[in-house]
Image (cartoon, rainbow, N blue to C red):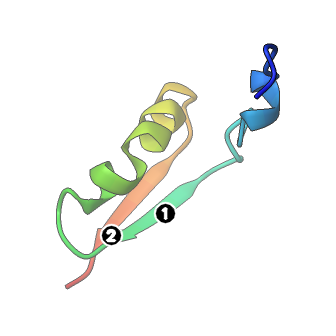
Amino acid sequence: MSESTDYTSRTLVNTLPEGPYLVFATYPGDESLGLGGTLALASQADISIGIVFVG
């Protein structure tokens, strides 16, 4: 492996996609485990979020 590593090339997403977001989860808590970080960032960016629990 080389001494210098370009960490910016490993970034998957630089910005959040425009909302609103709609999340489907089978059990309460699944939305947090799968998308918790994304939903927190979306909330801070005033993006509307809806969560539907199915099951």
Mark 2, Cα crowd under 10 Å, few <14 / some 14-19 / many 20+, is: few
Query: Disc number at residue 52?
Result: 2
In the displayed structure, does residue 45 sit left or right of residue 30? right
Mark 1, Cα crowd under 10 Å, few <14 / some 14-19 / many 20+, is: few
Q: Secondary structure at mark 1?
A: strand
Query: Disc number at residue 22?
Result: 1
Q: Amino acid at mark 2?
A: Val
What is the spatial separation of the Cα atoms under label 2 and label 1, in whole angstroms? 8 Å
The residue lying at 53 percent from left, 37 percent from top is: 42
Q: Most extreme residue toward the bottom, as rendered?
A: 55
Q: Quadrant of the N terminus?
A: top right
Q: Amino acid at mark 1?
A: Leu
Q: Secondary structure at mark 2?
A: strand
* Residue nearest the observer in this picture, 18 or 34: 34
Relative to 20, does residue 47 appear above or below in the rendering? Answer: above
Q: Quadrant of the C terminus?
A: bottom left
The residue lying at 82 percent from left, 33 percent from top is: 9
